[in-house]
Amino acid sequence: MRDGTLEIVQIRAGEMANFSYLIYCPLTLRGLGVDPSFAPDALLDAAGERGVAIEVLVNTHGHPDHIAGNGAVLAATGARLAAHPLDVPGAEIPLGDGSVLAVGKGSLQVLHTPGHTPGSLVLHPPGALITGDTLFVTFVGRADLKGSDPAALFASLRRLAALPPETLVYPGHDYGPQPVSTIGYERAHNPFLQCGDLESFLRLRMG
Ligand SMILES: [Zn+2]
């Protein structure tokens, strides 16, 4: 039996409105954790309640509010850490654009989406995006931090906006009117995705 369907569990993690994620194959109960943030126990509990073994832990980028719980999750599960080397140099599995991660009988693709940080990643399981701090519901990531590149962020967002409108958007923080949206919703309601050129994006994002 082959079925690539993956379950996605959104987990509230910490006081900065972070979201962690558990992505798993319901047939094999093999799973992947994303950004444990300041609440690694919440991710571990979500896996434990479902009987899922976390085999890989992915960081969407290297900011402390996303990677803080890495050590606790790795120690508890024996998972391997996967991330872009520009953001997390020591990761056991270096990821880049086009990388594919197997999750049980399914898999997800990795998009390199620089801008918020040089090594920002978006995870693309079938029909969904785990967008880290690149795209939020009706908002986008900061581009004024050390290592940020606003022009690169604009290009990364254009790439995401070109995906099918029904694609689900699971952001790295709960900053919008709802915790999950779609690319179609973002095209309609996210002012940063409605900027037609880099100049208008820079005016809106950088003030
Ligand atoms: Zn960040």
Image: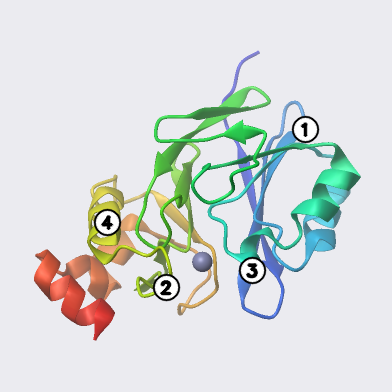
Image: 51 above or below 197: above
Check disc 2 and report the residue beneath it: 145
Image: 81 above or below 187: above
What residue sits 57% from the left and 64% below the top? 63
Q: Which mark is residue 29?
A: 1
Q: Which mark is residue 65?
A: 3
Q: Amino acid at mark 2?
A: Leu
The alpha-carbon separation of the residues under discs 4 and 2 comes to 13 Å
Check disc 4 and report the residue beneath it: 152
Q: Where in the figure is residue 104, as x and y percent of width and height? A: 68, 25
Q: Nearer the viewer, residue 26 or 43?
A: 43
Q: Pointer 1 and pointer 2: residues touching (CB < 8 Å)?
A: no
Q: Pointer 3 and pointer 1: residues touching (CB < 8 Å)?
A: no
* Sequence order check, earlier mark of 3 and 1: 1
- Look at discs 4 and 1 and give the one toward the viewer: 4
Q: Amino acid at mark 3?
A: Asp
Q: Where in the figure is residue 20, as x and y percent of width and height? A: 66, 59
The alpha-carbon separation of the residues under discs 1 and 2 comes to 38 Å
- Look at discs 1 and 2 and give the one toward the viewer: 2
Q: Where in the figure is residue 44, as x and y percent of width and height? A: 83, 53
Q: Amino acid at mark 1?
A: Leu
* Disc 2 C-beta below 8 A from ligand 1: yes
Question: What SS does tag 3 mark?
Answer: helix
Question: What SS does tag 1 mark?
Answer: loop
Q: Pointer 4 and pointer 1: residues touching (CB < 8 Å)?
A: no
* Sequence order check, earlier mark of 1 and 2: 1
